[in-house]
Amino acid sequence: MRILKLCLVFIGLILCAACSSDSDSLKDEEKPTIRVAYEGGFPQGCEVLKRGETYTFKAQVTDNEALAAYSLELHHNFDHHTHDDQSETCELSPVKEAVNPFIYRENFKLDDRPKTYEISIQVSIPDAIDTGDYHCGFSVTDATGWQRRTSVDIKIVE
């Protein structure tokens, strides 16, 4: 009798586990989006920035569920490397060695988990950096860990 009860409990547990709810099987498989090419988005492709100036970098990010974090990165492109998503081709200066390149990296959390958000980050370009070709990279991560990146070619001048 005891073995029969244990078997019935075991079978019941198996049936319960096999009958999961629809919400358990729905998973977020959609990456967030980043848009810089809109009125107010900055910088646009091939934008020229000046040393010693302060700029507000802006991009619109969205997700079907919830956004969790974003980042901004600025780094030199003196070696003419590219990123997968670059669509616009800009006129590049000759290849050169970096002496004092400008590098900016900052990560930000979105604790309120919005579905849409406008990134707006003020960055001052130092006076004593190498001028030339740079990349501006935006990144966004949603609450389930999906990430999207986009990169824009820019130039920093005197």
Image: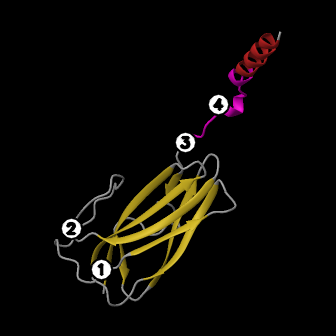
> Mark 4 and mark 3 in contact (Cβ < 8 Å)?
no
Question: Marks 3/1: CA distance?
Answer: 36 Å
**Which region is colored magenta?**
16-30
Q: Secondary structure at mark 4?
A: helix
Residue 36 visible somewhere in the drawing: no
In front of the other: 76 or 38? 76
The reply to whether the C-beta atoms of the residues labelled 3 and 1 are less than 8 Å apart is: no
Q: Amino acid at mark 2?
A: Asp
Spatial CA span between label 2 and label 3: 34 Å
Measured from the top left, where is residue 112 in percent x and y?
70, 61
Pointer 4 with pointer 2, Cβ within 8 A: no
Q: Marks 2 and 1: CB-CB under 8 Å?
A: no
Secondary element type, mark 1: loop
Q: Quadrant of residue 90?
A: bottom left
Reading the image, the residue beneath label 2 is 79
Q: CA distance from mark 4 to mark 2?
A: 46 Å
> Which image quadrant for residue 24?
top right
